[in-house]
Image (cartoon, grey):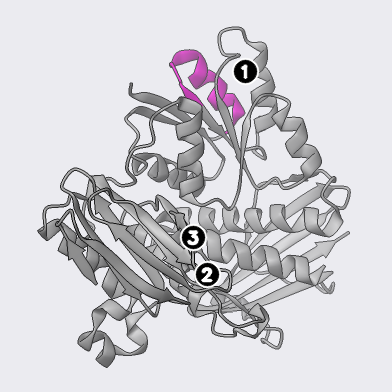
Amino acid sequence: MEQALYRAAILTFEELGFMFPVENNDGAELENSASVNVSVDFDGTISGRLVLQVENSVLPVLAANMLGVDESPEEDLMSDVLGEFANVICGNALPSIAGKQKIFRLQPPQIVVRFDSDENPSAEARLQLDEGRANVRLYVN
Amino acid sequence: MALNILIVDDSAAMRSIIQKTLHISGLELENVYQAKNGAEALQMLEENWVDLALVDINMPVMDGETLINHVRENPDLADLPIVVVSTESSEARITQLRAKDVEFIHKPFAPETLRETVFQLTGVENGTSTLSGGNFDF
Amino acid sequence: MKVSKQPDDVLITYALGSCLGIAVYDEVAKVGGLLHVMLPVSTVNPAKAADNPMMFVDTGVPELFKACYKAGAKKERMVVKVAGGASLQNNADKDQFQIGKRNFIMLRKLLWKNNVLINSFDVGENYSRTMSLDMATGEVVLRINNKETRL
C-alpha cells in the first residue's frame, strides 16, 4: 500500500507539478504552522481519507508550475491547485491499492487548517522536493 | 473552421490548465466555455453551439457521468464528441464510460496528449505546436 | 548548439545519454536548430553557466529559440522534437541522481511556462541516441544501436 501511495504521489509531482520528488522515509513530521493540508474523502470498495500536507515553501512553486505561469497565483487558486493535486494522487493510488476493477467515488477536496489525528495512517509517503517537503497520508476505514 | 469547446471541471486550476493547452495547441478557437459541474454544462450546451466537450467525472451538484447520460439521451446533443478528463483509473469504470462513446484522458496528463486527442476528435489537421506567447521571453 | 538555414545542412548530435537533444524547425522559413543540453538547471554551477549556458536546460533552450528567431523563424511555426534523457545505469534504481529524468521534467516545465508543446519525443530507457535534423525537410532521425527511426 505504501509503495502504491509513493508511486501515485511521485507520478503526480512529476507530471502535474513538474517537480522532482525523492522518497524521504526518515523525514520528520511537518509542522502544522509551516504547512498546508488538504484532504480528499473517498468511498467505494474501501472508504477513507487521503491527506496531502505540503510545506509553505512548496505550494507557490507547485501552483505556478501547474498553471504554467511565472508568478504564484492568488490564494484561492492556490488552494484549488492543492485540492486538485490531492485529488489526482488519490484517484491514482486507490485502484492500485484495492484492485483495477474496483470503483471509487471521490468527494471534493477540503483545505484543513490543522490536521491532527490520533490514528496512525494506513500508509504514508514522505517526499523531499527541491523546494521543501510533502507528506501524503492514507487513512482507510 | 473555428472550434467551440466546453470545459467541465469543478477545479478552477484544472479548467485553466486545459484552457491554456487548447490555446497553445495551434487550434483555431472561437469560444472556450467553462462550467463547474454537469448542471452548468447542460445549460451552456442548450444555449450555445459546442463542437467538443472535455468533462471531469467527480464533480458536485451533477457529476460527469450523469451529464454524459443527459447529453446522449438528448437528440439535439447526442452526437457531441466528449473527452472524459479524469483521475479515474479503475478499469471497470473506464469500460463503462467508453461504452457511452467517449474518449478518455487520464489525469495527470501531458498537455501534448490532450492536444492529440482534440485534433483526432475534431478532425483538424495536426499543425505546429506553438503560439507566440504574451510576455514570455522565448 | 547549431542553428542553420541552409537546406543542404544536416545537423547532428551524437551519443545522447542522460543529455537531451532538442530539435526545432520552422518549415516556412526553413530555419532550424539542434541543442545538446547536459544538466537541468544552471543555478547549480553559475560559473560554468556563465561560461557555457548551452550546457543547461534552463539557459540553453531560450538561447536556441532566440537564435532561430534571429535567423527568421517564428515561434508559432516552430516544431519541437526531443530525444535522450536516458538512464544508462544497468539498474535504474541505482541511478540515484536521475539526471536524464530531471532534464526532461525541467524542459517540459520550461516549455509549458513559455506556451510551447512538444511535437514528438523519445526519452528515457537505458540506451544512447544519436539525433539528426535534416534542414531541407525538418525530418528528425534517431540512430539507436545502429538502427534508424524517424521521430
- Check contact, mark 3 vs mark 2: CB within 8 A: no
Amino acid type, mark 1: Val
Residue C133 drawn at (x, y percent):
30, 59
Q: Assign the N terminus of chain C to one quadrant of the image.
A: bottom left
Q: Which mark is residue C122?
A: 3
Dot 3 falls on which chain? C
Q: Residues within 10 Å of mark 2 (few under 14, many from 20)?
A: few
Residue A55 drawn at (x, y percent):
55, 75
| Identity of the residue drawn at 44% across and 73% down | C103
Dot 1 falls on which chain? B
Q: Is residue B103 visible?
A: yes
Amino acid type, mark 2: Asn
In this rendered view, identify the residue nearer to me: C98 or A52.
C98
| Vertical position of residue B32 compared to residue C58: above or below | above
| Identity of the residue drawn at 39% across and 58% down | C141
The answer to whether residue B50 is magenta is yes
Q: Secondary structure at mark 3?
A: strand
Q: Which mark is residue C151?
A: none
Residue occupying the far front of the picture: C146
Magenta highlight range: B37-52
In this rendered view, identify the residue nearer to me: B2 or C69.
C69
Q: Which mark is residue C145?
A: 2
In this rendered view, identify the residue nearer to me: A69 or B126.
B126
Dot 2 falls on which chain? C
- Check contact, mark 1 vs mark 3: CB within 8 A: no
Q: Secondary structure at mark 1?
A: helix
Which-is-in-front pick, marks 1 and 3?
Answer: 3
Q: Is residue A71 visible?
A: no
Residue bearing mark 1 = B71
In this rendered view, identify the residue nearer to me: A68 or B3.
B3
